C-alpha cells in the first residue's frame, strides 16, 4: 500500500477524482433508496451527487491541463491508513439516522483529505481548487446534518453527539481495548508458567513485570506506527500509541502485582481473581462501546483467556 505522504501531486489529484466518483455514486444510491419515503431528503442527496460530479469534472480538467490525458488508477483502499467507504447495501436499515451518520463521515473524511492535500500542494491552481473543495465538503456535512432536524419527529432525536462519541471510540477506546486485551491475555502464559514451574512468587513477579513492560512498549510502538491518523480520523498516533501501551502494561501488571505476596498459594489465588476481573472488564468495554452482545463477548474473551491460562499451567507444570 502507498503512504499518503509519498504521493506525487498528480497522484493526489488522481485519488481525488476516484473519491469524487465513488462518493457521487453513493449519494445517488441514497437518493434512489430514500425517494419513496423521504422525497425531500432524496432531492438533497441527488443535488449532492450532482455536485460531486461537478467536483470530479473540475478535477479532471485541472489534471488534464497540468499532467496530460492519462489518469492513473488510485483508490482509497490503496492508501495506508485510509478507511474505505462502507457499501450502502451493507447498511442494515436505511433510516435517516443511518444515512445522516454515513454521509457526515464521508464529508468529514473528504474535507480532511482536501485540507491535507492542499497543504502539500505547491501549485497555486491545484492548491486553490483543493481548498475550495474542502469548503464545499464542509457544506455537504451541514446539509446532511439538517436531514435529522427536518424529518425526525420531535422528541425522537437523541441528545448524544454521535460524532464526538465516534472520535472517542476511534482515538481512545479502540487502542485502549486492544492494549488491555493483549496485556491481560498474552501475559497469562508466561506469568503462570513461571509461577507453577518455580512455586516462587518472586520469580513469577519478575517474569510478569518483564512481560508486561515489554508488551506495552511493543504494542505502543505498533499502534503509533500503524497509521498517522490524518485520513482515517483516528487521531494523533502518539496519543493512540501511549493509550495502547499504557493499557497493555496495566492489563499485564494487574495479575502480576498479587505475586508480591510471599505465600505462593495466596498470591496465585488472588492473581486468578484479578484475571477474572480483567476479562470481565474487557467484556464490558466491548459491550458498552463496540455493541458486542454480552454473551458473545464473554464466550470469546473467556475462551481466549482460558486457553492461554491453560497453556501457562501446562508449560509450568511440565
Image (spheres, rainbow, N blue to C red):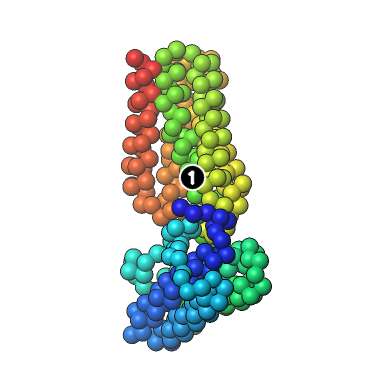
Position of 35 with respect to 232 (left or right) is: left
SS class of the residue under badge 1?
Answer: helix
* 60 over 108 or under it: above or below: below
- Most foreground residue, 318 or 156: 318
* 258 over 164 or under it: above or below: above
Among the 4 quarters of the image, the one containing residue 300: top left
The residue under the point 43% across, 65% down is: 73
- Most foreground residue, 68 or 50: 68
Residue 174: x %, y % from top left: 49, 49
Residue 114: x %, y % from top left: 58, 68
Position of 124 with respect to 216 (left or right) is: right
Using the rendered image of the protein, determine whether residue 291 is visible from the camera's viewpoint.
yes
Among the 4 quarters of the image, the one containing residue 9: bottom right
Q: Mark 1, residues whose alpha carbon is within 10 Å: few (<14), some, or many (≥20)?
A: many
Residue 17: x %, y % from top left: 48, 72
| Numbered marks: total | 1
The residue under the point 49% across, 45% down is: 177
* 318 over 220 or under it: above or below: above
Q: In which quarter of the image is the C terminus?
A: top left
Using the rendered image of the protein, determine whether residue 113 is visible from the camera's viewpoint.
no
* 211 over 140 or under it: above or below: above
The residue under the point 43% across, 34% down is: 185
Residue 147: x %, y % from top left: 48, 79
- Give the residue number, with chain letter if any, for mark 1: 177
Among the 4 quarters of the image, the one containing residue 22: bottom left
The residue under the point 44% across, 58% down is: 78
Amino acid at each position: 500500500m502507498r503512504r499518503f505522504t509519498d504521493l506525487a501531486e498528480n497522484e493526489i489529484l488522481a485519488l481525488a477524482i476516484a473519491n469524487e466518483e465513488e462518493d457521487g455514486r453513493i449519494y445517488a444510491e441514497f437518493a434512489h433508496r430514500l425517494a419513496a419515503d423521504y422525497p425531500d431528503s432524496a432531492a438533497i442527496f441527488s443535488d449532492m451527487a450532482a455536485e460531486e460530479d461537478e467536483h470530479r469534472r473540475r478535477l479532471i480538467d485541472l489534471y488534464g491541463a497540468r499532467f496530460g490525458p492519462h489518469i492513473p488508477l488510485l483508490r482509497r483502499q490503496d492508501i495506508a491508513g485510509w478507511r474505505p467507504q462502507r457499501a450502502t447495501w451493507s447498511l442494515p436499515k436505511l433510516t435517516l439516522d443511518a444515512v445522516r451518520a454515513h454521509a457526515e463521515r464521508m464529508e468529514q473524511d473528504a474535507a480532511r483529505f482536501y485540507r491535507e492535500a492542499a497543504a502539500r500542494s505547491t501549485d497555486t491552481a491545484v492548491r486553490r481548487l483543493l481548498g475550495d473543495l474542502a469548503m464545499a465538503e464542509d457544506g455537504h456535512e451541514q446539509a446532511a446534518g439538517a436531514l435529522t432536524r427536518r424529518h425526525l419527529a420531535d422528541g425522537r432525536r437523541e441528545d448524544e453527539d454521535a460524532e464526538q462519541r465516534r472520535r472517542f471510540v476511534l482515538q481512545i477506546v479502540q487502542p485502549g481495548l486492544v492494549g488491555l486485551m493483549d496485556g491481560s491475555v498474552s501475559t497469562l502464559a508466561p506469568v503462570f508458567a513461571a509461577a507453577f514451574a518455580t512455586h516462587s512468587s518472586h520469580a513469577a513477579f519478575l517474569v510478569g513485570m518483564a512481560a508486561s513492560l515489554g508488551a506495552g512498549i511493543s504494542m505502543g510502538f505498533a499502534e503509533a506506527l500503524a497509521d498517522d491518523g490524518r485520513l482515517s480520523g483516528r487521531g494523533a498516533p502518539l496519543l493512540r500509541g501511549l493509550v495502547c501501551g499504557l493499557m497493555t502494561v496495566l492489563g499485564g501488571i494487574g495479575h502480576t502485582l498479587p505475586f508480591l505476596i510471599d505465600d505462593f498459594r495466596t498470591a496465585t489465588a488472588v492473581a486468578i481473581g484479578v484475571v477474572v476481573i480483567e476479562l470481565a472488564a474487557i467484556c464490558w468495554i466491548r459491550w458498552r462501546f463496540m455493541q458486542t452482545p454480552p454473551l458473545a463477548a464473554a464466550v470469546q474473551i473467556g475462551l481466549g483467556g482460558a486457553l492461554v491460562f491453560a497453556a501457562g499451567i501446562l508449560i509450568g507444570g511440565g
